[in-house]
């Protein structure tokens, strides 16, 4: 009677051990991989980088510039930083243009310019060690089952899948039988659940028979591990080039979320929207960017989890958002991770109760995202070895779309891991300042009809 259960358990542990060994092997190869080739020096990119950082010299915003530097150096004030380290940091971003950039930064900061000697650590996308934690087989099976059900649901709704000829892992789910008087809606999802994202559950029924093209990046599914080498993971530029070739310059609307906004920005650069008049024949007619990463040139609170411990970041976030907040225990962390708190704090709650609810959500989101996202192997590789600003940072094309009232940017208001309460307000101001008259919708609850009206 006990033979079958023992065999099942034995088979499970063998499979778990094989998965762990494979994960360790791929991670070890990634750590030993040669440094990535940095993009060539790009003067246009350098100007946009310093413009978005508000560090262009006299007349720029010293407070915004100081915040930008502080985040890159994990909270250290600019005046306490070694000048050589700041120069090296700018060099990592801008190459040979870093000398002029350092002069402009010092002119912006004035008395708060870095003056010390020595070295210190800093963060630059595309450069860093790959750190990841193994995800158990049951979790991986659960994610793959969700993806299987999502694929089946798309087929039932009339979608057909085609593989990209240049990137085998990239596929397109297209529904062509819809209305022909409207351009197709191109959907670029972010990292996480992929086709199983709640975004599709609410969006597709609301779109009716609208023509839709979903760019399915299968490697962006949490828990997935490449068979052999992470160097084969496509970059933002490669994805954008493949999607541009697929579109063949046909008019399109774009809806992008998180990592997908980086692809959208690179895609718009590829399609050269600035040469197209805002008419019905425009290549990109309208665009919606949800939680964009293409307007911020440096590191955010969220990205700091790639290098910082969740305890350190949680303590900082609590000090910013919950005044007088005390320390927390691992039991409190476990309780809030397992029992997901409500992210939306009711305005009717008293201040003390609201602070307690914010505390629960901060702890939950920081530790949850740290394990499931920021310590995922592919995500760590993309951010630390394969993500470069010149590929995706807006060069003014998105801001031009916005001036023509063809761009909507949505910032999730309940994301404490992405930004602190104070930083969310600053981010909104940054978006409003640098994308003139930018439409920023603060989403207090996930309400798709608020922006689907733009497409339906």
Image: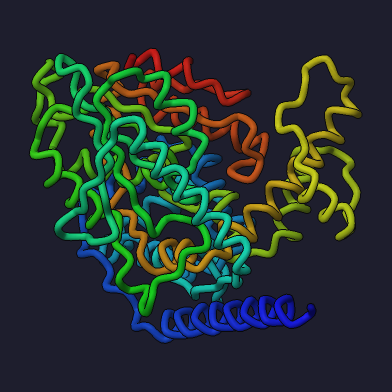
Is residue 357 visible in this depiction of the protein?
A: yes
| Colouring mode (rainbow / by chain / secondary structure / one colour) | rainbow
Q: Is residue 425 above or below residue 241?
A: above
Between 260 and 138, the residue placed more toward the observer is 138
The residue positioned 56% from the left and 33% from the top of the image is: 426
Is residue 396 visible in this depiction of the protein?
A: no
Q: Is residue 255 left or right of residue 321?
A: left
Horizontal and vertical percent for residue 367? 71, 55
Q: Quadrant of the C terminus?
A: top left
The residue positioned 57% from the left and 78% from the top of the image is: 15
Report the residue that reaches farthest toward the front: 1
Horizontal and vertical percent for residue 170? 27, 54
Between 165 and 413, the residue placed more toward the observer is 165
Between 202 and 68, the residue placed more toward the observer is 202
Q: Quadrant of the N terminus?
A: bottom right
Q: Is residue 267 left or right of residue 382?
A: left
Total count of labels: 0
Horizontal and vertical percent for residue 415? 62, 37
Between 441 and 69, the residue placed more toward the observer is 441
Q: Is residue 120 above or below residue 155?
A: below
The residue positioned 12% from the left and 47% from the top of the image is: 245
């Amino acid at each position: 009677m006990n033979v079958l259960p023992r065999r099942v358990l034995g088979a499970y542990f063998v499979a778990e051990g094989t998965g762990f060994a494979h994960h360790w092997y791929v991670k070890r190869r990634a750590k030993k991989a040669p440094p990535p080739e940095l993009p060539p020096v790009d003067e246009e990119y350098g100007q946009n980088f310093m413009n978005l950082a508000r560090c262009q010299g006299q007349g720029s915003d010293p407070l915004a510039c100081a915040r930008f530097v502080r985040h890159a150096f994990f909270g250290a004030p600019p005046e306490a930083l070694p000048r050589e380290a700041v120069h090296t940091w700018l060099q990592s971003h801008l190459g040979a243009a870093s000398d002029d950039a350092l002069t402009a930064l010092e002119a912006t900061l004035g008395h708060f310019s870095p003056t010390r000697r020595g070295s210190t650590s800093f963060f630059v996308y595309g450069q860093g060690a790959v750190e990841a934690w193994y995800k158990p087989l049951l979790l991986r099976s659960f994610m793959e089952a969700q993806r299987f059900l999502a694929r089946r649901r798309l087929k039932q709704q009339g979608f057909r899948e085609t593989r990209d000829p240049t990137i085998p892992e990239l596929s397109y789910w297209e529904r062509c039988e819809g209305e022909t008087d409207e351009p197709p809606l191109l959907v670029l999802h972010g990292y996480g659940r992929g086709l199983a994202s709640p975004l599709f559950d609410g969006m597709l029924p609301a779109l009716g028979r609208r023509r839709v093209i979903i760019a399915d990046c299968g490697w962006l599914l949490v828990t997935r591990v490449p068979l052999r080498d992470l160097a084969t993971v496509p970059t933002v530029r490669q994805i954008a080039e493949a999607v541009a070739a697929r579109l063949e310059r046909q008019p399109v609307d774009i809806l992008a979320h998180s990592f997908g906004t980086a692809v959208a920005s690179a895609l718009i650069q590829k399609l050269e929207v600035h040469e197209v008049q805002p008419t019905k024949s425009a290549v990109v007619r309208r665009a919606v960017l949800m939680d964009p990463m293409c307007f911020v040139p440096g590191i955010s609170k969220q990205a700091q989890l790639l290098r910082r411990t969740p305890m350190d970041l949680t303590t900082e976030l609590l000090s910013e958002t919950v005044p007088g907040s005390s320390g927390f225990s691992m039991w409190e962390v476990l309780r809030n991770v397992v029992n997901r708190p409500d992210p939306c704090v009711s305005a009717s709650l008293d201040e003390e109760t609201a602070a307690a609810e914010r505390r629960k959500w901060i702890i939950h989101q920081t530790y949850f995202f740290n394990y499931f996202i920021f310590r995922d192997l592919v995500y760590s590789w993309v951010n630390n070895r394969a993500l470069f600003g010149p590929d995706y940072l807006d060069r003014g094309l998105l801001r031009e779309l916005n001036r023509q009232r063809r761009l909507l940017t949505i910032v999730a208001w309940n994301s404490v891991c992405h930004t602190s309460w104070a930083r969310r307000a600053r981010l909104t101001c940054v978006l409003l300042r640098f994308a003139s008259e930018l439409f920023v919708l603060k989403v207090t609850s996930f309400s798709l009809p608020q922006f689907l009206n733009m497409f339906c």
